[in-house]
Amino acid sequence: MAPKSTAAAKQPTTSTPSALHETSPAAAGNAVQSLLKAYNETTSPRLKLIDAFLVFLMIAGVLQFVYCVLVTNFPFNAFLAGFGSCVGQFVLTASLRSQVNPANRNEFKDVSPERAFADFALGSVVLHFFVYNFLG
Amino acid sequence: MKLSLLVLSSLLAARETLAGQLSLQQARFSVLGGDVSPLRQEPISLSPANEPDPVRLGPSDTLKLAFTVVTKEQDSDAEPKGVQPHQTFVRFFDKQSGEEGIVPVRVAQSGKAKFELSMARPPSSLPPTPLQGNETAPLTVSLLMGSFDHSPYSLQLFDLYLPPSQPAPEHPDEKTFHPQPEIQHTFRPEQKLPSKFVSGLAALVVVGGPWVVLLGLLSQVPLSTPHLLSPSILPFTVSLTALEALLFYYWADLKLGQVLAYGAAVGLVTVISGKTALEKRGEWRLQGKK
């Protein structure tokens, strides 16, 4: 009996890591799936629109950076303008998203969504002015 | 040189008014070799006609002058007595270059004076003696004396050949006063654009990729723009688009001043239309209208 019990006691200890290894991708997959599901169900379409724009900006910035590293940074001012516009627009859009998000209503009591959009529009126009200046 | 001439002429002018006259006694010169062996020794005659042969000094030789300054009262047969003039100089003058050097001589109260010119350590006031052909130019050596109580006295002693002087040491900044070697600028090689194919492909990926993703994501989002064409919203959208178009046109063609002027005008319209549009939007939001 004693050997059996030790074996039984041993088995979980030896199998725990392998079980973790086996279950972790599935668990992670589950987590991602539930996250996506919750996102799809609870996020308003307008925030999804902003999120899509954020993803667009991020991909554009990453691709430009990869091109700069792998191929060439010449002309450098054009790279700066393109990459800077992506980063700047991302920042402006992210702040717009955080201000118009109903979940953040308590954080931005004084800022109406209209005011946030006006700030976003003004900031974007100024940013684009500077970006076109850099573009050369 | 000018100064010495001035001093001399003023002394000569004062000559008439002064009593007595300076003179020399037992004047002689000698040339000693480097080992202090006398090479030449001659008395100095006071009359200019008896000027001795030119004196030549080697690089280690020493010239010695010895004399006694005396004064002799006019119209008197009294024995001349030693006197100490107020100023006594030996003057070295280069006739060719016009350079001169004046070395003071110390005279004792009894009138006895000794002067030494050691070529091993020449005084810095000696005029330069550059080599001309095989020889240096001779210096005319004379003795000048001045006194408050006596007429001035000058005596040409002899011509002196000195060993050639060292060239003047070069000043540290000397080379900056000459033409400098031409500056050759080197530039980094011109940066090259990647080939048309590579840059075209990259442009396609960088520009197209994000748009594909954006459109794909937007197709998943149920979007409706019911108020886009409403009269309160449309001016704002149009003027924002006009601002962006103006900025694009600025990149393509316009100057900064132009874009600032046009931008101010369009911006004013945008501010007004935006205020009305967003106010309307706020009302709708408060009414619970989507």
Image (spheres, rainbow, N blue to C red):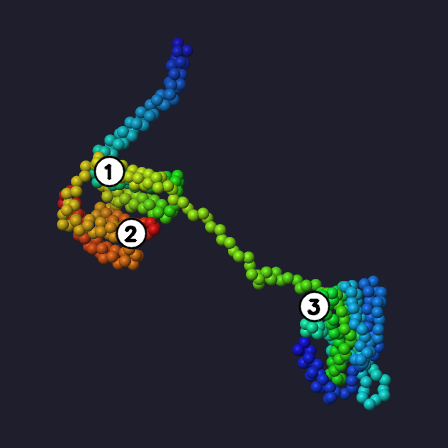
**Residue picked out by circle 1:** B215
Q: Is residue A66 above or below residue B121?
A: above
| C-alpha gap between disc 1 and disc 3 | 94 Å
Q: Is residue A78 left or right of residue B163?
A: left
- Which three-letter amino acid code belongs to the residue tagged 3? Pro
Q: Earlier in the sequence, mark 2 or mark 3?
A: 3
- Chain letter of disc 3 in the image: B
Identify the image quadrant of the N terminus of chain A: top left
Q: Is residue B17 left or right of residue B198?
A: right
Q: Residue at x 81, y 85 (%)?
A: B72
| C-alpha gap between disc 2 and disc 1 | 27 Å
Q: Determine if marks 2 and 1 fall on one subunit.
A: yes
**Residue picked out by circle 2:** B252
Q: Is residue B57 left or right of residue A84?
A: right
- Which three-letter amino acid code belongs to the residue tagged 2? Ala
Q: Judging from the image, what secondary structure is the residue with disc 3 in?
A: loop
| C-alpha gap between disc 2 and disc 3 | 75 Å
Q: Determine if marks 2 and 3 fall on one subunit.
A: yes
- Which three-letter amino acid code belongs to the residue tagged 1? Leu
**Residue picked out by circle 3:** B128
Front one among A103 and A120: A120
